[in-house]
Amino acid sequence: MNRNEIANLIYNQLDKNKETLTAQFLKSKEAIGYFFIDDLLPKDLALEIHNKFPSLEKTVKRKSLREYKFTAYQMNTYDSLLEEITYAFQDKKVIQLISEICDLEEIYGDENLYAGGLSLMKKHNFLNPHLDNSHDKDRDRWRILNLLYYVTPNWQLENGGNLEIWPNGLKEPQTIIESKFNRLVVMTTHQKSWHSVSKVKKDATRCCVSNYYFSNKPLLASDNFRVTTFRGRPSEKVKDLFLRVDNGLRSNLRKIFKNGVRENPHQYKK
């Protein structure tokens, strides 16, 4: 299937559930707004998307105190279905419908897939609590929505690798959103939207299609420019100290070098 056909399927499923999704988002809007929808695509198509994911050897490993995961974003080097599903979320009618569900205006997709694309996590992989980078690659628009589409069949909560959001900050318990097969999660991103991914416990790979939407203005009037900002979990006191220092160093560098010391390679170079 091509991206237009897949976008039509996504649109129809969202539109059919629009009232429920809007209520879910509004309920969480004052903290970290989010909604999720299950059975987004026909099961056979979702399985095919999963089966087309590249092996870990063909991806980019990201391993540090902040995170341990694998990413893939040069989409023309993988099966064409992966590019089609990724860009189906960039379809204008899908973006418009999601903007209506979230009661937002002037939302734009990202042709460059800056920090988007494919995400793969194997056993022991994790993503520490963090705030997403505030802008697109050119620092022209504000990052406001994070879209995560999970495609690993039979993924269970106890496997780990689940999305965690921290609506009341890192001193309060997190909300866990299971990385369930064929589930789309849409969440806001701003200077209070702390989120993380729990450590994968199963000897398997959790696969996710990732997209971001942007706007000419931030979600919160108090938002300021930021680099991706990591923290330790409540139990990781020493790690948290190191990450705070790391955040400060990277933030100061971006004040000097607007576009970074080097161009972020995590974007689709067409």
Image (tube, grey):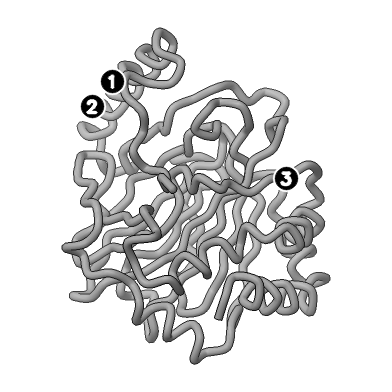
Q: Residue furthest top?
A: 256
As measured in the structure, the alpha-carbon distance from the residue carrying label 1 to the one carrying label 3 is 33 Å
Mark carried by residue 107: 3
Q: Residue furthest bottom?
A: 44
In the rendered image, the quadrant that contains the N terminus is: bottom right
Is residue 138 placed above or below 129 in the rendered structure? above
Is residue 123 placed above or below 138 in the rendered structure? below
Query: From the viewer's perspective, is 77 left or right of 1?
Result: left
The crowding category of the residue bearing disc 2, from other C-alpha atoms within 10 Å (few below 14, some 14 to 19, many at least 20), is: some
Q: Nearer the viewer, residue 31 or 89?
A: 89
Q: What amino acid is at disc 3?
A: Ile
Mark carried by residue 152: none
In the rendered image, residue 76, in percent from the top left (x then y), is placed at 38, 60
Query: From the viewer's perspective, is 8 left or right of 248?
Result: right
Q: Which residue is mark 2?
A: 242
Instruction: Determine whether label 1 and label 3 are within 8 Å by CB.
Output: no
Residue at image point 23% right, 75% down: 204
As measured in the structure, the alpha-carbon distance from the residue carrying label 2 to the one carrying label 3 is 35 Å
In the rendered image, residue 102, in percent from the top left (x then y), is placed at 75, 54
Q: Earlier in the sequence, mark 1 or mark 3?
A: 3
Q: What amino acid is at disc 1?
A: Val
Mark carried by residue 245: 1
Query: From the viewer's perspective, is 239 left or right of 162?
Result: left
In the rendered image, residue 259, in percent from the top left (x then y), is placed at 43, 21
Q: How many marks?
A: 3
Instruction: Determine whether label 2 and label 1 are within 8 Å by CB.
Output: yes
Q: Nearer the viewer, residue 267 or 192?
A: 267
Q: What amino acid is at disc 2?
A: Phe
Q: Earlier in the sequence, mark 2 or mark 3?
A: 3
As measured in the structure, the alpha-carbon distance from the residue carrying label 2 to the one carrying label 1 is 5 Å
